[in-house]
Amino acid sequence: MPSPTAFITGITGQDGSYLTELLLNRGYVVHGLVRRASLFNRSRIEHLRLDPAIGGKKLFLHYGDLNDTTSLRRLFRTLQPTEVYHLAGQSHVGLSFEIPEATCQEIANATLGLLEILRDQEQPVRFYHASSSEIFGAPLSAPQNEDSALRPASPYGCAKAFATNLCRVYREAYGLFVCNGIAYNHESPRRGENFVTRKISLAAARISRGQQTELSLGNLDAQRDWGYAPEYVEAMWRMLQQPSADDYVLATGESHTIGDFLAAAFGTVGLEWQKYVRFESRFVRPTEPVRLVGDAAKARAKLDWAPTTKMAALARLMVAADLAEPAS
């Protein structure tokens, strides 16, 4: 029996790298879409690409752009993937206020283009769309589930809400196997350094080594539901193994402030974060979700999935990983 073939957009990102490892371990052949600009930004998958038993044999990278649907159609026709994991797009919520048009183009329109390509495939393709808790934005109640109202509070959230609803429309109108993974914040040592959790873990490690003296942040009262990325990509895969497509909230069900994350991270190195953190207004977003916390009961019941790594443990493992890196 031939190996299943997966196609991943955003393969060089945090989730893409963990998902690639998971799929390879399950016997998949994995193809990933990379932009030419990604040439020097493949550190998360470099260990796989350079492995002589994997690179060029089980893992293949293809240059492309989500806005170039002609090339994508050609690629789909050649690869004929059985599963597609759409993880790519401008993923920084705060940055979406500065580049709203690019954010909507990369998230909303690109998803539409992929859905149109799926409609034309001769063989059915199972499609995972990386939705986000940001579609709930300023929720009227907590926790949120798959039926909660969409009330995005950022250009990023608006773009994700559009793409999420579009996936539902294409699933119902055309019978496509399309799943929305409504994932709450999930972090890891592979998180980009411009995200607040990684800024915090790096600062804790560097300050403890005497390499940094302070950390500038915005609103410390913002609350998020933080989980561990490798556990979340497991849920992504499980969605596409179900007999029918559906949408699932992926969350820990616990809400914590950025101050809580600071306490856990700096506590790992025996420091009091209040001595080192400085407020900087430029990091405050024009609008900020009040309390994003998810109810993953459906994922527990149907996918047999539940996250085990909660916020404090997550902060500790991220700091530990940054401490393990050579001092620079």
Image: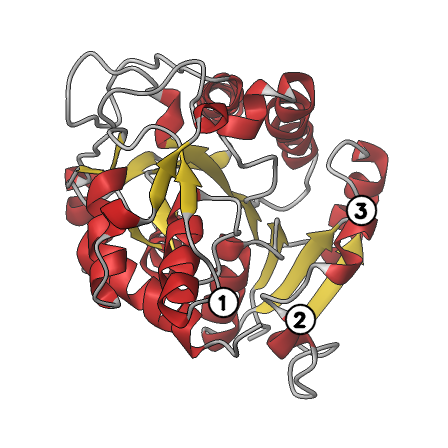
The residue depicted at 26 percent of the width and 27 percent of the height is: 146
Give the mark nearer the N terminus: 2 vs 1.
1
Q: Amino acid at mark 2?
A: Leu
Compare residues 147 and 229 and report the one nearer the observer. Answer: 229
The 10 Å Cα crowd at callout 3, few under 14, some 14 to 19, many 20 or more, is some
For residue 139, above or below residue 74? above
CA gap, disc 2 and disc 1: 10 Å
Q: Secondary structure at mark 2?
A: strand
The 10 Å Cα crowd at callout 2, few under 14, some 14 to 19, many 20 or more, is many
Q: Nearer the viewer, mark 3 or mark 1?
A: 3
Where residue 63 sits in the image (x, y, percent)?
81, 53
The residue depicted at 20 percent of the width and 61 percent of the height is: 267
Where residue 100 sits in the image (x, y, percent)?
62, 18
Q: Amino acid at mark 3?
A: Gly
Residue underneath mark 3: 64
Q: Going by the image, does 39 lie left or right of 125?
A: right
Which quadrant would the C terminus be assigned to in this image? bottom right
Outermost residue, bottom side: 52
The residue depicted at 39 percent of the width and 22 percent of the height is: 135
The 10 Å Cα crowd at callout 1, few under 14, some 14 to 19, many 20 or more, is some
Residue underneath mark 1: 23
Where residue 200 sits in the image (x, y, percent)?
38, 51
Q: Going by the image, does 202 lie left or right of 232?
A: right
Compare residues 4 and 183 and report the one nearer the observer. Answer: 183
